[in-house]
Image (spheres, helix red, strand yellow):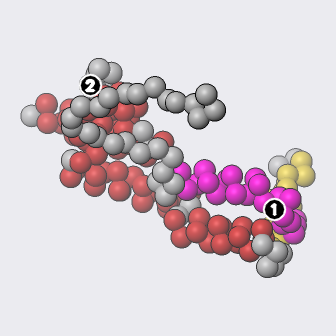
Amino acid sequence: MASAKKQDNQYKLFAQEYIKDLNATRAAIAAGYSEKTATMQGSRLLTHDKVKQLIQENMSKREERTEITADNVLKDIHIAREIALGIKPHKMIIKDNIGDGMTEHVEQELHKTDLTAFVKLTELQMKHLGMFIEKQEVTHMGHITMLPHKDEDN
């Protein structure tokens, strides 16, 4: 019985760690799996029904806490596109710290020059939500031959 409880705790910890950066190997190590088998365990855990449910629950809780949802990110991308194309200016309310714990809200027009930071922030949000795939894992069964790269100039 203690073994099942330990495994449930590992599943919970894996799910909590996984949503931080969507790195299954790192999450498996953090959940107490061996570094030698972490890649395999992480991959296996991502297909386990209970773990998938825990990950989804944790992601939903995070969405509620942060109010960052896929819909919000897509709206931000749409706004960035309109600004970049000069379709319409966009005004943002910025919270400004004026000292002594006081803040004021300042309306500021977002210009094309401000767009680089806005797009980078949106990209980071997309990665965090799993909407942006930076790398993809591919499994291949069989033989692979590595050939040297030929330089076309030589």
Q: Residue at x 55, y 56 (%)?
A: 126
Q: Is residue 13 visible?
A: no
The location of residue 76, given as percent across then percent down, is 65, 67
Residue closest to the far right: 98
Give the class, few, some or many, for how many residues have Cα within 10 Å of label 1's Cα (few <14, many ≥20): few
Distance CA(mark 2)–CA(mark 1): 47 Å
Q: Quadrant of residue 37?
A: top left
Query: Main SS type for the magenta part?
Result: helix
Q: Position of residue 83 (x, y in %)?
A: 78, 71
Q: Magenta span covers which residues?
A: 105-128
Figure check: 89 above or below 43: below
Residue furthest front as drawn: 154
Q: For numbered disc 1, what is the local secondary structure?
A: strand
Residue 109 within the magenta-colored segment of the rendering: yes
Compare residues 108 and 126 and report the one nearer the observer: 126
Q: Secondary structure at mark 2?
A: loop
Q: In the image, is residue 23 above or below residue 108?
A: above
Q: Quadrant of residue 14?
A: top left
Query: Label 2 is placed on what type of residue?
Result: Thr
Q: Is residue 66 left or right of residue 76?
A: left
Judge whether residue 54 is colored magenta: no
Q: Position of residue 43 (x, y in %)?
A: 28, 39
Q: Which residue is mark 1?
A: 94
Q: Is residue 116 visible?
A: yes
User: Disc 2 vs disc 1: which is toward the camera?
Assistant: 2
Q: Residue at x 67, y 53 (%)?
A: 121
Residue 37: numbered disc:
2
Q: Are marks 2 and 1 in contact (CB under 8 Å)?
A: no
Foreground residue, 149 or 115?
149
Q: Position of residue 129 (x, y in %)?
A: 49, 55
Q: Residue at x 71, y 70 (%)?
A: 81
Q: Is residue 12 left or right of residue 101?
A: left
